Amino acid sequence: MLDASETVRRKSCGDAILRAAADEFAEKGYGGARVDEIARRANVNKATLYYRIGDKETLYHAVLECVMGGIADDVASAVSMADNSEEKIRQFVLVIARNTEEMGYTAPIMLREVASGGSHLPDHALAHMNRLLGALDSALADGVKQGIFRPVNSFFVHMMVIGSIMLYAVNEPIRQRIIAQHAESKAPNQTVTMVRAAEQVSELVLAAIQNTKPRK
């Protein structure tokens, strides 16, 4: 069940102007994006764009709110409903993968920000990232308490998940070129669905954090 703030966010994220802005920022980054091109993509004039949303920075911040706020909301909900610590980890990974797939602009925008040191990330986007890390940290702590997981640095686990999912999402063109060049070889299939990718990442993470010491 969505609360009022989540409902408003989802409605605004479906706005044609914000979708056009998201696609423009994903393709060209913040520095290369142009407001007139965003207006053209959204089939509105610039005056309408400025009136309804705002300037380029406001547009970018609104896109990041959709990206980070949406993922954080979905992760919090899924993790809270999971039955056990291992399922919490699986849901954490799966929700991120599904959101990354559904909002195709997510991975390129976020990876550009990582590469630039977060030069255009507003405080509210960082707050949502902290919510993600908090949900993961809680799941890991529960697992350690139960003797299922060994103590690990939650930030590095977070990077394992985000890095794997988002890099997989953006390198589709490269993978397709590799597949085309080696069409006759018996190399393993390098293309799986995002859901299957999430399952494999989850298994790798769970194997890495599993407590292998005998329980007392």
Image (cartoon, rainbow, N blue to C red):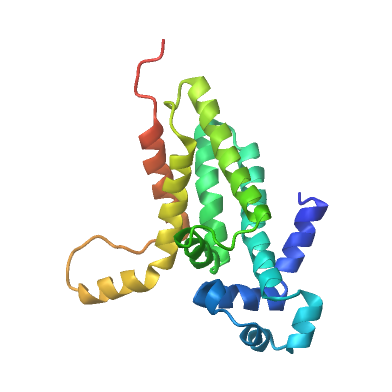
Indicate the position of residue 80 as horizontal and vertical percent values: 65, 38
Nearer to me, 86 or 121: 121
- Could you tell me which residue is drawn at 60 percent across and 37 percent down? 82
Q: Quadrant of residue 46?
A: bottom right
Nearer to me, 199 or 125: 125
Is the residue 199 above or below the residue 169 in the image? above
- Could you tell me which residue is drawn at 48 percent across and 36 percent down? 154
Nearer to me, 184 or 157: 157
Indicate the position of residue 10 as horizontal and vertical percent values: 73, 62
Is the residue 200 above or below the residue 53 in the image? above
Q: Residue 193: in sight, yes or no?
A: no
Taking the image as shown, residue 155 lies to the left or right of residue 130, namely left
Nearer to me, 89 or 29: 29
Indicate the position of residue 141 as horizontal and vertical percent values: 53, 28
Tell how many labels: 0
- State the residue lying farthest toward the left: 185
The quadrant in which the C terminus is found is top left
- Could you tell me which residue is drawn at 39 percent across and 30 percent down? 210
Q: Quadrant of residue 165?
A: bottom left
- State the residue lying farthest toward the top: 216
Is the residue 150 above or below the residue 27 in the image? above
Taking the image as shown, residue 144 lies to the left or right of residue 175, namely right
- Could you tell me which residue is drawn at 42 percent across and 46 percent down? 160
Indicate the position of residue 31 as horizontal and vertical percent values: 54, 75
Q: Residue 75: in sight, yes or no?
A: yes
